[in-house]
Image (cartoon, grey):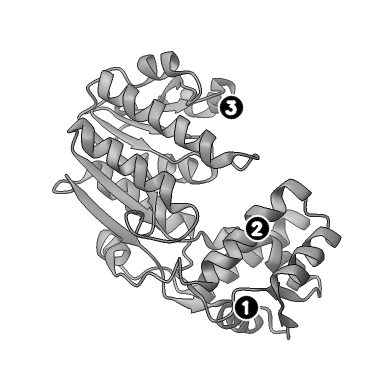
Amino acid sequence: MKILVTGATGKLGSKVVETLLKTIPADQLAVSVRNPDKAEELKARGVEVRQGDFDKPDTLDVAFSGIDRLLLISSSEVRLGGDEIRMRQHMNAVAAAERAKVKFIAFTSANKANDSNFFLAPVYKATEAAIVKTGIPYSFLRNNWYLENEIGSIQGAMAGAPWVTVTGDGKVGWVLRQDLAEAAAVVLTGSGHENTTYELSGKLMTHRELVSVLETALGKKISFQQVDDETYAQLMKDAGIPKDFLPLLIKIQKGIREGGLAIESDDLEKLLGRPVTPIKEALIQIVNQISHSED
């Protein structure tokens, strides 16, 4: 059996690869990356490194050749027009997987992609539909929000800055990338995951509740500010957030406020065979990582 992970040098993909290497021989694993030079260390460990670019379908034909089980990690495209770019990239990858006669596709999707109002959902809904249409057995790994997405705010809070949000009482199932990587590895190496959909979420919390746990982890009080969209946009602009990125940031906050990430599910702990990493423990891990990176 040959497993291939796309985006293997990315933040999630690299964790999936490391998790897989603990359970399967390196010669059973291949990775698809845009720049093979960044995967030299994996190559040295016996992992087959293939060049694959979602924007260049011919490279994907080669990258996916002879693959039994494929982990298609969704594009993290955030440029202006990112949805259109992400859609094209996903469709290129799905079509290439079909041409290569891949036997199983695991796809990192978005919570309730088929019926969510969250602004990111349409791309994932279309990608899931395209995968189903191929007839290839699949597993949709609908990841909730990475806790690591809050690193900027956590760093600010550690430095004494206020935590500013417009999410109101909207809840999020924050979860560490490592937990999601382990779940993906279970699906790729296990049996009985054909044509499944998993809602992968941590305990639901508001931003206020998250900050309260962070205060305990840090042992200090954090100023918490709920503001309106216009004030938030101005504060982010003043903080140096690029103008082109501001609309995306506002959409994320609005989506959370409207319940787009409030998905309650125990699918993740069932796949892991253990509880999801508790939010306090997860926050302490991130705080320690930040502290070490600043040393």
Q: Which residue is mark 1?
A: 214
Q: Which residue is mark 3?
A: 38
User: Please, what is the three-letter code of the amino acid marked with disc 1?
Assistant: Leu
Label 3 environment density (alpha carbons within 10 Å; few <14, some 14–19, many ≥20): few
Q: Nearer the viewer, mark 1 or mark 2?
A: 2
Looking at the picture, tell me which residue is in the foreground, 252 or 230: 230
Q: Which residue is mark 2?
A: 249
Looking at the picture, tell me which residue is in the foreground, 10 or 43: 10
The secondary element bearing badge 2 is classed as: helix
Work out whether mark 1 precedes mark 3 in sequence or the reverse, and give the earlier one. 3
The secondary element bearing badge 1 is classed as: helix
Is residue 76 visible to us here? no
Label 1 environment density (alpha carbons within 10 Å; few <14, some 14–19, many ≥20): many
Q: Residue at x 39, y 60 (%)?
A: 116
User: Please, what is the three-letter code of the amino acid marked with disc 3?
Assistant: Lys
Q: Residue at x 74, y 73 (%)?
A: 157
Q: Residue at x 47, y 60 (%)?
A: 118
